[in-house]
Amino acid sequence: MKLLPVVDFGSRSSTTIAELDAACRAHGFVLAVNSGISKALSEEAFAAAKELFAMPESAKLGLTRISAATNRGYAPLKLESLNHARGADQKESFNVRFSNNDLDGCPESFVAVVPKLLEAAREACRRYTVASALALGLDPRYFSRHFETMEQCTIRFLHYPPPRGESLVRLGEHTDFGLFTLVFVDQSAAASGLQLKPEGAKEWTNVDGSEADCVVNTGALAARWTNDCWCATEHRVVVPDSTAARGHRYSIAFFFDPDPDALVAVDPKFCASEPPRYSPITAGDYLSAKLRAMAPTNA
Ligand SMILES: O=C(O)CCC(=O)C(=O)O
Ligand SMILES: [Fe+2]
């Protein structure tokens, strides 16, 4: 596969917009620069996340625990499964949202960086929603108007410890749920291990995001709005080589999910040659169902 295009989130040039559209139609993955989340801030966030995950097990188990209803807090190793057929994911994580975070027991550095990241995420959302609406030939506010409260957006800090002779798949194949996701990977990891498989492809392709701020991928709600013109492509995280197998991998995923009352219905623009593939659903109903399915007990 051709290397992923590097998209400048601040640019509205016709070349950038056309590259974004072409990549999202082909597989839904691009690399971003000028995302709104600076290098210094992502480095500060990784340092804080490493401190959080290095806390003793007993302290981590005392942190607020994630549930499908809140989607905030700590998920211990192997609690969740993005792909049930494959078993538990080899990761622990901590989620924050735009309000009602309970950071009791988290390191000071973590408590300090969360509000900065949330503010930067708001800017990243503004930049990318406008760029993607333009790329699709839609009104510039087509998506951004559904990110007023940002209450369904989530920042997820992830830690994948060295695998203990188990599966080399760290995170099972899945598609993301929302409009789009930004993934930052700690650059000290020898190789990222993030892979994507476009529909119909037989092989997995490595995603190398080292030249950019982060990787951006299209989520299922963008696919629904565009009648699959923009793809929500399967991706996963594997242990890419023996050096990585001894290492810890850290990433931070920003999930941009529209406000709960946003009605996601296929836009007529994408129904010229075929009927809508999806019935309308609110972003609230869609995301709740997905989060319940990912939870360990389906509760
Ligand atoms: O950790 C990563 O690099 C990817 C995470 C991811 O795809 C997800 O959490 O949905
Ligand atoms: Fe994902």
Image (spheres, rainbow, N blue to C red):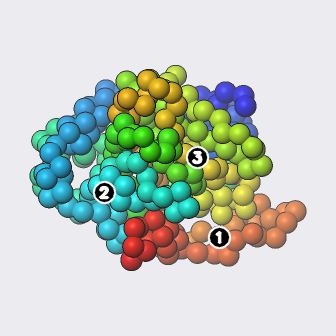
Q: Amino acid at mark 3?
A: His
Task: Name the residue located 64 percent from the left edge and 50 percent from the top edge.
Answer: 233
Mark 1 neighbour class, 10 Å CA radius: few under 14, some 14 to 19, many 20 or more:
some
Kind of residue indicated by mark 1: Ala
Q: Which mark is residue 235?
A: 3
**Are circles 1 and 2 on residues that touch, CB within 8 Å?**
no
On residue 75, which mark appears? 2
Residue at (70, 71) in percent of width and height: 278
N-terminal-most mark, 3 or 2: 2
Residue 221 percent across, percent down from the top left: 59, 61
Q: Position of residue 137 (x, y in %)?
A: 71, 49
Which mark, by number, is residue 183? none
Does residue 42 show up?
Answer: no
Query: Could you tell me the amino acid type at mark 2?
Result: Ala
Label 3, ligand 1: CB separation under 8 Å: yes
Residue positioned 13% across, 51% down in the render: 59
